[in-house]
Image (cartoon, rainbow, N blue to C red):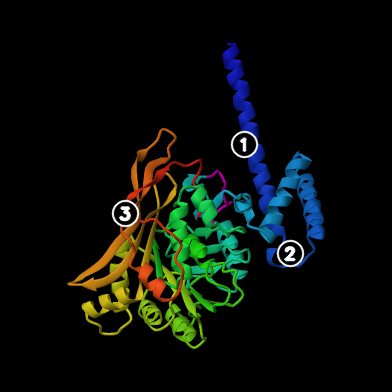
Amino acid sequence: MIADLQNSSGNRMQDRRQEFEVLKTRIHRQMIDAIDLSKASDLPEADLRAQLRALANHLCQQQQANIPADDREIMVTAIMDEIYGFGPIEPLMSDTDVTDVLINGADTVFVERNGLIERTDIQFADNEHLMQFIHRMVGRTGRRIDEVSPMVDAKLPDGSRLNAVIPPLALRGPTVSIRRFRSRAVVFEDMVRMHTLTQEMADFLIAAVRGRLNIVVSGGTGAGKTTMLNNISRFIPETERVVTIEQTAELQLQQKDVVSLETRPPNIEGRGEITQRDLLKNSLRMRPDRIIVGEARGGEVLDMLQAMNTGHDGSMSTIHANDTRDALDRMELMVALAGVDLPHSVARQYIANAIQILVHITRLGTGERKVMRISELTGYHDGIYELNDIYVYRMTGIGSDGRARGAFYATGHEPEMLKKLAARGYEVPNMNFSARELGSQTNDAPYSA
């Protein structure tokens, strides 16, 4: 009997909590409907907060809603976030451990935190609320999204990268993916500490950059390609002029003489598009010492290879691929997209002449990032690329802590690039390339790319 009374009391308390949440949500919605979000942002924040507080009090009195002052202030703050910030996902965008925010419709929000995807309890009121959020975010970038142009890729004012797809393309409601901007870039020291690679491997890559070798970083989505490209580009000498070309600007070069170029999508009439290939062709007239293409995606690969083969030594790019050999195959396919009728053997020779170093990085199922191999491309003979691994990572399993077990190894291949660098007068650091294990690697925590 006592148990029945306790259950009955518990049910009544739960019902009251649910009624309270419904009431709070309704008043929150009425507050949003009562103001013009687009014009509200013109008001000083202190004045707007005072007006919202007065509106919350008025609506509570009007509906005889006994909502505590603390909860009303939470509603006011939520609307301030709608106007000045990121609305319901503001807490996620303020969390330094979150690298990606993934919104699959109004009621499903995931994040990537420390390399792993997890679902949150954050929701938008409905799809209309989510659409308002998308229009507000996209509007801040000067771009547009609607039924005519239902996809957009944009860089937000804080540096984060947003991709949005809306109906009719998104069948289950608007979808948003945000790659958060890191105010402090992940550097080699971080990557070595988190065992993404070893200090010896980092030193080798630094030597390759300073020695003006052409480098391609390959990997899957979210593997950390841009993070690696940012890292190695830090070691370009200040005396050199660098032009960067990206679809959405993400690179954070700190050198003084850097020109950053970004593509432009077509307007509503389908005109005015500026592609990476357009920018790459134009960059050759800008007297660059090096050209960095954020991610090679199509026919611009041919122009990039031409630049690498004609005096712009030390250029770099990334490419989506499963390993270093796959990266070469994909580049060959992209050369074909340039619309130039090149025999396969000529395209392969062109690639082999242009690129010296390939770096493949992977995000493991544990959330950790690993440089799986650093390879040297020395030529192309008898239909085969001469691709030699210098360093590799070999995974042996997963430990009881859920982290990868394995080790980095030097393969014993002494790079031919050492002779090329010496011929250019570059002093190569004393490095030991003998075959050996560089040390077993386990993590305290994976870095977030």
Q: Toward the viewer: 165 or 424? A: 424
Q: Amino acid at mark 1?
A: Gln
Q: Are the residues at dot 2 and dot 1 in contact (C-beta closer than 8 Å)?
A: no
The residue carrying mark 1 is: 18
Rendered residue at 44%/47% (across/down): 368
From the image, which quarter does the N terminus lie in?
A: top right
Say what secondary structure mark 1 lies in.
helix
The residue carrying mark 2 is: 40
Image position, residue 353 (x, y; %): 31, 76
Q: Which mark is residue 411?
A: 3
Vertical side of 341 occupied by 71: above or below: above
Q: Residue furthest left?
A: 382
Rendered residue at 62%/52% (across/down): 88
Rendered residue at 44%/85% (across/down): 281
Image position, residue 337 (x, y; %): 31, 78
First in residue order: circle 1 vs circle 3:
1
Question: Does residue 211 show up?
Answer: yes
Q: Amino acid at mark 3?
A: Thr
Say what secondary structure mark 3 lies in.
loop
Q: Toward the viewer: 159 or 390? A: 390
